[in-house]
Image: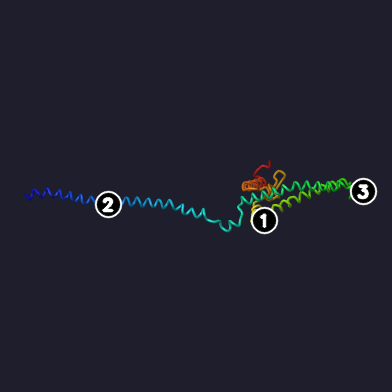
C-alpha cells in the first residue's frame, strides 16, 4: 500500500514546487515594468523641459551695457543715409538762392564798357561773380543741412560719432589705392558716401575688389 502511494505523491509535490517557483517570477516583473515606464516617462519629460528652461533666460535676458552704448549697423547706416538726404535737399535751394542773390546784386550794377575790371569786360566779371555766388550756395547747403540734422539727433550724437569713427576705419582699410585708377577704371566711391545699408556696403566691397582685379590686369578694361 505504501509503495503505491509514494509514486503518486511525488508528481504532486513536484507540481507544487513548480507553481511556487513560477508565481514569484510572474508577479515580480509587473511592478518593475510599471516603475521603469514611469521613470522613462519622467526622464523624457525632464529632457523635453530642459531646452525650454535654458532658452527662457536667453530670450528674457536684458541687453548688456555695450549693446546699450552702441548703435546697430543697420540703424546707423539708415541714419547716415538720411543725413545725406538732408544735405542734398538743402544744397539745391541754397545753390538757387545764391545764384538769384548774385544775379540781383550784380545785375543792378551799371556797367561801363570803357572801364574794364582787371582788363576784362565788366559783363564777364559780373557774370563770373554771379556764378561764384551760386557755387558758394552749393558749398553752404550741405553745412546747413548737416547742422539741422544734428539738431534733430542730439540724443544719439555720441553713439553716431562713435559709429562714424568705426565706419571710417572700415572704409580706409578696404578702399583701393586711387593712384591705380585710369580713364576706363575710375575709383568706385572712394569715401563710401553712397553706402546707406548693409547691402550697399557689400556691393561697395565687391566694387573695390573688381577695381583691384582690373588694375592688376586680370580683367579687361572694357
Instruction: Rate crowding at label 1 as few (under 14), some (14 to 19) or many (20 or more) other CA atoms within 10 Å.
Output: few
Instruction: Indicate the secondary structure of the residue bearing disc 2.
Output: loop
CA distance separating discs 2 and 1:
79 Å
Report which residue position mark 1 lands on: 154
Q: Earlier in the sequence, mark 2 or mark 1?
A: 2
Q: Is residue 75 left or right of residue 38?
A: right
Report x, y in % for residue 187: 69, 47
Report which residue position mark 2 lands on: 28
Instruction: Indicate the secondary structure of the residue bearing disc 3.
Output: loop
CA distance separating discs 3 and 2:
128 Å
Looking at this view, is 202 or 185 the one in front? 202
Looking at this view, is 184 or 96 the one in front? 96
Mark 2 vs mark 1, foreground winner is 1
Instruction: Rate crowding at label 3 as few (under 14), some (14 to 19) or many (20 or more) other CA atoms within 10 Å.
Output: few
Q: Is residue 99 left or right of residue 219?
A: right
Report x, y in % for residue 89: 72, 47
**On the image, which quarter does residue 154 sit in?**
bottom right
Q: Is residue 213 left or right of residue 126?
A: left
Residue at the image position 18 percent from the left and 50 percent from the top: 16
Report x, y in % for residue 41: 38, 50
Report which residue position mark 3 lands on: 115
Amino acid at each position: 500500500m505504501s509503495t503505491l502511494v509514494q509514486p503518486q505523491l511525488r508528481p504532486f509535490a513536484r507540481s507544487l514546487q513548480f507553481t511556487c517557483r513560477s508565481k514569484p517570477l510572474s508577479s515580480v516583473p509587473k511592478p518593475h515594468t510599471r516603475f521603469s515606464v514611469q521613470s522613462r516617462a519622467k526622464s523624457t519629460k525632464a529632457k523635453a523641459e530642459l531646452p525650454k528652461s535654458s532658452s527662457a533666460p536667453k530670450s528674457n535676458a536684458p541687453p548688456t551695457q555695450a549693446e546699450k552704448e552702441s548703435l546697430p549697423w543697420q540703424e546707423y547706416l539708415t541714419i547716415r543715409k538720411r543725413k545725406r538726404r538732408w544735405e542734398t535737399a538743402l544744397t539745391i535751394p541754397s545753390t538757387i538762392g545764391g545764384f538769384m542773390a548774385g544775379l540781383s546784386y550784380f545785375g543792378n550794377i551799371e556797367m561801363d564798357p570803357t572801364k574794364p575790371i582787371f582788363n576784362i569786360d565788366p559783363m564777364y566779371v559780373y557774370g563770373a561773380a554771379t556764378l561764384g555766388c551760386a557755387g558758394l550756395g552749393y558749398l553752404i547747403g550741405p553745412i546747413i543741412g548737416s547742422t539741422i540734422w544734428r539738431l534733430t539727433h542730439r540724443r544719439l550724437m555720441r553713439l553716431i560719432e562713435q559709429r562714424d569713427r568705426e565706419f571710417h576705419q572700415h572704409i580706409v582699410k578696404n578702399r583701393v589705392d586711387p593712384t591705380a585708377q585710369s580713364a576706363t577704371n575710375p575709383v568706385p566711391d572712394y569715401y563710401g558716401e553712397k553706402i546707406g545699408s548693409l547691402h550697399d556696403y557689400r556691393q561697395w566691397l565687391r566694387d573695390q575688389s573688381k577695381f583691384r582685379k582690373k588694375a592688376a590686369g586680370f580683367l579687361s578694361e572694357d
